[in-house]
Amino acid sequence: MSAWTATGRLVRLALRRDRVVLPIWLASICGLIGVVVAAETSLYQDADQRAAGAAFGAANTITRIADGPASGTSIGALSFVESYLVLAVFVALMSGQAVVRHTRLEEETGRAEIIGSSVVGRNARLSAAVIVAVSASLLVGLASAAFLMGNGLPAGGSWVAGAALAGTGIAFAGVAAVAAQVATSQRGANGIVGLALGLSFVLRAVGDAGGHVAPNGVELVSAWPSWLSPMGWGQQMRPYYQDNWGIAALFVVFAALLVVVAFRLSGRRDLGAGLIADRAGRATADRGLLRPWGLAWRLQRVPLLWWALGLAVIGAAMGSVGTSLDDFEEASPQFTAMLREQFPGAELVDVYAAFIMGFLGIAAAGYTVSALLRMRAEEHSGRLEPLLATATDRRGWLASHAAIAMGGTVAVLVAMGASGGVAYLAAGGTWSGAMGYVGAATAQIPAVLALGAFVVAVFAIAPRRSVAVAWAALAASFVAGQLGDMLKLPQAALNVSPFTHVPAIPAEPFGFLPIACLLAATAILAAFAAVAFRKRDLSIPA
Amino acid sequence: MNEAIGVEGLVKNYGSTLALDGLDLHVSEGEIHGFLGPNGAGKSTTIRVLLGLLRHDAGEARVLGGDPWADSVALHRRLAYVPGDVNLWPTLTGGEAIDLLASLRGGIDPVLRDDLVERFQLDPRKRCSTYSKGNRQKVAIVAAFASDVELYLLDEPTSGLDPLMEAVFQDVVRERAAEGRTILLSSHILAEAEALCDRISIIRNGRVVESGSLEAMRHLTRTSIHVHTERPITGLAGRAGIHDLEVDDEGAEFEVDGHLIGDVVADLSRFGILMITCTPPTLEDLFLRHYGDELEPVAAGTGNAS
């Protein structure tokens, strides 16, 4: 028996387990590419506008940080620059999480022990996980290239764009392989991958911000820190402009080195152990923990902090662009015309604030849904059972998690709006413009709360389906509420989303009635959930 | 004596699966009651109904005089529960989990808690994610016994404990029972039930098939007797209540119904007893008597193969 015996069978096992999640990633990534290409095509009517857009992207520090290095004026290049960072995050998470899922999670749950005691080589598990993640990344690259060509873009550049995405996935498969050896839990390993992703973003942001505009005026030459980041490599491949195939080798070498390190580490440690030792904690509980609310806060506070921080940073980035809107109008009259068309007579800065915060409202709703689904995780894992066998009231438990998630939603949205406003002020904007960001963000609160109350109600009556229904509801709200106008959906479909009913403050006046209706819907759904949850069986794994 | 648990004709369906099929269970105050049956017989479902975590479809259930569904919070202050499969919050330490569970129940005695942590040799400073199954089980056991309650519902509490810890567990259960508290101990470890329980209920396919004290149950079943006599035994063959008889010139081996032991031994004394051993049925014998038909096809299958 070699160290790799049964790798093939473990690959098949992993593919079977991922038969739903990987296709979803693939479809999401291709769908996003389609949206971006369509948007860019409709945004730029002619070569002059494309040239202006590229010149703006190369010169403006904010777009350098948010999008990356401008690479010429072709529609393919503009689309790639616009979308690569988001797609790269998707591919990296898909690939990294797949590796962690089939290595560290297997050890954490004890499944690796059962598998390991059969005729399976010592390196088979890690090898199978890396093979699955690398194959999935290659498939994403192939599918995106095909999809880009299908959208009428040149074949050469499309293959380079696909290779950049595949390479990003492969690089983060390597990162995850090491992370899975270092951390002792799935959560910890995914955290390390996320941290690496963040570092990768920051390095290339520093490099791009510190770069200089090439003589042709439509290319940004990045500074050296961009070359330290896998995301930077993907951008430097510059599809539809220079088609730098050679850079793809960097991904392969980087991933291969990390995988070798992961095998070395794996050979030196015991099953289930990590390299970061667990330190001893408290022998007795803090007084604050000893109530249902204390426990819920303890479980919810860390994700809340990260969401608030992340959305505040994005809010600030968006706010700081607000003062350069006039330059942007020159570069892309099409986009600003589309904005103005929606709210005739309003100031462009106000329209922009309402538009941006409307999109970020969906991101905040992502926090709300994930925080509320923590309740389902508690129930499904069997941790709720001993808790409700104490003198803890069911409604009190439900209220503790729901209130923290809802309060957290308000905090996240206010933080996002405030940081947007402060950044706008810092960039030389006016007070009234800054207050517009705060108003636009807080206007999202009733819509997000109504969606949250719907999720609580679903959890209260149909726990087993709650996870799927909750995320589907968020996706439907996004499509109908934020994209509905652009997709020209009928009004009846738009009305499904709570976000459709939010007044577009500050571009529109404050409307009392829709806000009151959304809050009333929230209260009714929450009351219904409290009653229904008291009446149902606990859904416990047998 | 008052009833701590009174269940009559309990029915629970999971969709089309019938989990409890008219279950009766009576536990008096102050007794240690064994609740025996294999996996899937309905033990955990019964206990979850008694905790008000599941709703029953028919029948009656009373716990400490109250309705387990409607009065669940008030009742939970007076009882403690140890699940068979303990899952804890990975980021909390064992000590935090103990304090949390016990204080949500209504209060914790810190002296008692520290004493139990020491007796069960648990390191309360470790995070729950690093505990083995046995250690997670200990956390739930310590949290339950550190609470001052009238009733303990223990669902296979010792799965995963080593024999030393099993002995500590039995000591603690006896101490609590001596203080007049009631314990319902669901188990499939028969030695544990035999060592601890005053009364036993055997559950099968969602019904209790036998209930009573171990002595009473033994009385209802057969005792095996092995005897050596001075003179060859006559007159046993064909007699009512005698089973599996083997007689030779020096004595006999057979099984006899529990209520006939006295008569049979009196008869045997006529042949001059040199040596006699009476072996009462073990709990395992009792148990297998109710589940024997499930084992037979397996045994027959093995026989055919050889």
Image (cartoon, grey):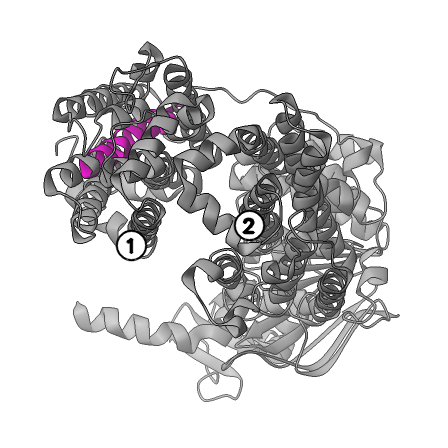
Front residue of A287 and A131: A131
- Based on the picture, tell me whether residue B293 belongs to the magenta stretch: no
| The quadrant where residue A253 appears | top left
Report the magenta residues as a range.
Answer: A162-183
Q: Residue furthest top?
A: A224
Residue at (61% x, 49% y) in the render: A368
- Based on the picture, tell me whether residue A178 belongs to the magenta stretch: yes
Q: Are marks 1 and 2 on the same chain?
A: yes
Question: Quick one: SS at disc 2?
Answer: helix
Q: Main secondary structure of the magenta part?
A: helix
Please state if B46 lies on the left or on the right of A127 as rendered. Answer: right
Residue count near mark 2 (Cα–Cα under 10 Å), binned few <14, some 14–19, many ≥20: many
What residue sits right under mark 1 in the picture?
A23
| The quadrant where residue A418 appears | top right
Residue A232's tag is none
Give the residue type at disc 1.
Answer: Pro
In this view of the protein, can residue B224 be seen by the observer?
no
When the figure is inspected, residue B177 is found, relative to residue A140, above or below; the finding is below
What residue sits right under mark 2 in the picture?
A362
In x, y percent, where is residue A380?
Answer: 55, 56
When the figure is inspected, residue A480 is found, relative to residue B120, above or below; the finding is below
Residue at (52% x, 33% y) in the render: A325
